[in-house]
Amino acid sequence: MTDSFSFRLIATDGASRRGEVVTPHGTVQTPAFMPVGTQATVKGLTVEQVRGTGAEILLGNTYHLMLRPGAERIAALGGLHTFMNWPRPILTDSGGFQVMSLSQLRKIDDGGVTFRSHVDGATVELTPERAIEIQTLLGADIAMQLDECIKLPNERAELERAMILSLKWAERCKRAFEGSPPGRALFGIVQGGDDGALRAQSARGLADIGFPGYAIGGLAVGEPQETMLRVVADTAPQLPADRPRYLMGVGTPDDLLEAVARGMDMFDCVMPTRNGRHGHAFTRFGALNLKNARHADDPRPLDPECPHPAARTYSRAYLHHLVRVNEMLGAILLSEMNVAYYQTLMAGMRAAIEQGAFEGFRAATREGWARGDLPPRG
Amino acid sequence: MTDSFSFRLIATDGASRRGEVVTPHGTVQTPAFMPVGTQATVKGLTVEQVRGTGAEILLGNTYHLMLRPGAERIAALGGLHTFMNWPRPILTDSGGFQVMSLSQLRKIDDGGVTFRSHVDGATVELTPERAIEIQTLLGADIAMQLDECIKLPNERAELERAMILSLKWAERCKRAFEGSPPGRALFGIVQGGDDGALRAQSARGLADIGFPGYAIGGLAVGEPQETMLRVVADTAPQLPADRPRYLMGVGTPDDLLEAVARGMDMFDCVMPTRNGRHGHAFTRFGALNLKNARHADDPRPLDPECPHPAARTYSRAYLHHLVRVNEMLGAILLSEMNVAYYQTLMAGMRAAIEQGAFEGFRAATREGWARGDLPPRG
C-alpha cells in the first residue's frame, strides 16, 4: 500500500513503452490489460479466477454501478474493492460512454448530461462533479474525467464541440477531484474523433490542465482499425512521456499489439469475456469458434503451451460440448482462458520491450495468428 | 486406485450409518452427497470449485450424455472422468428417470423404452443392455440398473407392474454388466412407489439377484416428505446391511438428515445448484432468498462460521446485487456455497455418527434451521 500515485517508465523500444503504475492498492506493470468488471464482477469469473489469469487491475463501470447498486450504497459497504473482494487496483470510467451508448439520453449541455436509466427509466443527472463524487465513493484508484464520447464517423463541428466540452469538463473534474484521498489519480481524456488537429488541441489542453495520466477516448466506436491506429500514432507522442497513456475500450489482440507499438500503456475491453460467452477463444493461433463441429471429437487442448492450466487441460471436444449444450461452464472456461490469453500477450509485450525485442515479438505474434490453429493432428 | 469395489461400515448410531465406499477412482466417505453433473459439468462450477466444497463423488446423467455428446464419443475421448477432468469417483444413473421426465416417451415394454430425444426429436432406444453399455463406455465407477420410475401417487397395479419390470431389468443389467472392467459396481434399484409390500418384494428380489449396492428409486417424485420417509424407514432395513444404500434424487437438507436417520448412505440432487441459480442459499439458519430487498445493505457474510471461504467472504449485499442484476457470478457463488453447505452437513452427520451423537446433531441442526437466519445485527 502506498499513498502516492506514480508512473515510472522502465524501458522503451521504438515507440513502445514498458512501465509501472503504483496505486494505493498495488502496482500495475504496463503495458497492461484491464478486464472489465461492469457490474462489480468480471462476467462469469470469480476474483480468484481473474487473478489467476495474471490480471493486476480491473475496470469498473460508473454508469452501471451508480444505477445498481448505487455509489452511496457501495461506499457504505466499504467501497468497490471490498464489495467485490478485489483488493488490487481498480480504475473506473466516468460513465460518459455508457450514458451515450446505453441510456435514452435526455439532454447534454455544459452543465452535464441528463438521461433515463436503462434499468428503470428513472431520470438521472451526471455532471463532472457527480462523476467524480461517484468514483470517489466507489474508491477507485484511478478515476476518469467525464467526457462526451461520440460515434465515428461524425462531422467536424460536432467532433469539435464534444472535444471542447470534454476539455471544459476535464477542468471541472480536476477541481472536483482536489482533496481526494491520497494516492488516487484522475486521468484526462483526449477527444476529437478522427481529426488530427482536434486531437492535438485536446491533448495540449489536457496537458496544460495537468493530469497524472491521460487516456485516448472516442475510439473503437465504429471506425476502421486503420483510422484508430492513425489517431493513436498521432496522439500518443503529444501526451507527456512521463505519464501513463490509456486507450479506452480497446480491443482485439491485434489492436493491443499495434497500439503498444504506437506508445500506449493501458487498455480495457469486454471482448475476452463477451466473446468467451459466445464460444469464441483467443489463442496464439488466432481466434477459434468452439461451436464449430470440427472440434466435436478433438481431444487436443486449446493450446498445449499456454501458461494457463485450463487451456492445457480441457479438450476442445469438451469445450465444444459445453458451448453446444449451453452450459455455464463453457462461458466460464472460455472467458477465463481469453482473459488469460490477453494477459499472456501483455506479458509477452512487456518482456519484449525490456529486451529491446518488440519488433521481433510483434512479427512472431502476427505469424502465430496467421497460422489459424495448431498444426494439424497426427 | 484400486481394482475392487468395496463398502465398509465404520460405525452405526441408531439406524444411521457411517461408512466408506472404495471405487477405482478413490474412496467416498458416507453418508455422502453427490453433486449432479448432468451434462458432464456441475452447473456453473469448475471441477476445482466442486472439489473445494468437499465433494468426493459426482453423479452423471446417462440420458443427457447419451444424447449429447454421445457415449461412444466420450469413450473415444478417454471416458467421462477425463472428458470433464474429474479424476475422482463418478456414479451414473441409468437414464430411466429422465426418459420418463424429459423425453416424449414412445413405447415401454419388457424389452426396454423407446423415446424421442428432447434435443432433436430423434427416436432412441434404451434397453437394460444398452443402459449398461453406455455407462461402461462413460467409465462410471458405479453404474445403475435401468428401472422404470413412475410418478406418485399412482395405482397399485401400475406400481406393481413397474416394480416387476424393474426387477426383470435388474437381472438383465446384472448379466450385461458381467465382464465389466474390474472394480466397477452395479447397483440395483428398489421400486414399488409408496406401497410397503411392493417395496419389500422389490428389495427381496434385488437381494436375491445380488448387487454390491442398492438404491431406493421412485421417490421425490411428487409425494409428501412424510410418505418418502415412511418408505425409506420401511425399506432401508430390508436391504443388506453390508452394502451401501443410495436414495436417488433426494433432496433438501432436511430430507438428507432424516434419510440418514433412517439408514441411507448416499444421495444426489440438483437442488443446491438449481436453487443457487435462482438466488436461494442453504445455510445453517435455513434457506435464504438473496433476491429479497432486506439483503441490499447487509454487510454480513452469508455465514461467518461456514467452513467454505466464499460464505465468509462476500457480503449478503454483494450477493443480492449479483442476483438482482442477473450476473453469472451470483449463480456461481450461490451454487458453490450451496454444494459446500450440503457437504458440511454430510461431514457433520458423519462425525456425529462416529461419536454416537447423531440424535444431538440432528436436534441442533433442526434448531439452527428453525432460527431462520443469523442473530439480528447490532
Image (cartoon, coloured by chain):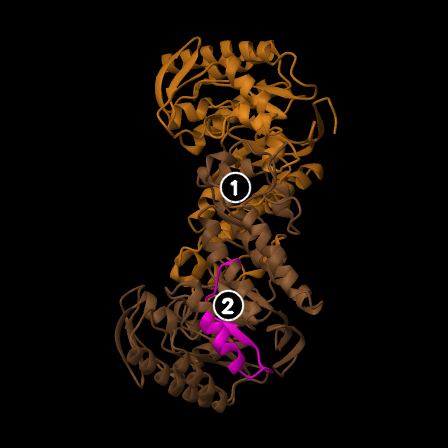
Chain colours: A orange, B brown
Tell me where the magenta segment starts and ends, as one range.
Answer: B230-253
Residue A162 x %, y %: 42, 14
Tell me the amino acid under the disc marked 1: Pro
Please state, as top left, top right, bottom left or bottom right, where the N terminus of chain A lies in the image. top right
Q: Name the residue under label 1.
A: A253
Q: State the residue at coordinates (52%, 82%).
A: B239
Q: Mark 2 points at which residue?
A: B59
| Other-residue count near label 2 (Cα within 10 Å), few / some / many at <14 / 14–19 / ≥20 | many
- In this picture, residue A269 sits left or right of residue A357: left
Q: State the residue at coordinates (38%, 28%).
A: A102
Q: State the residue at coordinates (50%, 9%).
A: A168
Residue A349 x %, y %: 63, 40
Picture disc at residue A275? none
Identify the secondary structure beneath mark 2.
Answer: strand
| Other-residue count near label 1 (Cα within 10 Å), few / some / many at <14 / 14–19 / ≥20 | many
In the picture, residue A177 is in which quadrant? top right
Q: Can residue B150 be seen in this view?
A: yes
Identify the secondary structure beneath mark 1.
Answer: helix
In the depicted structure, whether residue A226 falls above or below residue B74 = above
- Per the model, the C-alpha gap separating discs 1 and 2 is 39 Å
Q: Residue furthest right?
A: A2
Q: Which of A81 and A317 is in front in this view?
A: A81
Q: Which residue lies furthest to the left in this view?
A: B106
Q: Can residue A54 be seen in this view?
A: no
Q: Nearer the viewer, residue A184 or B52?
A: B52
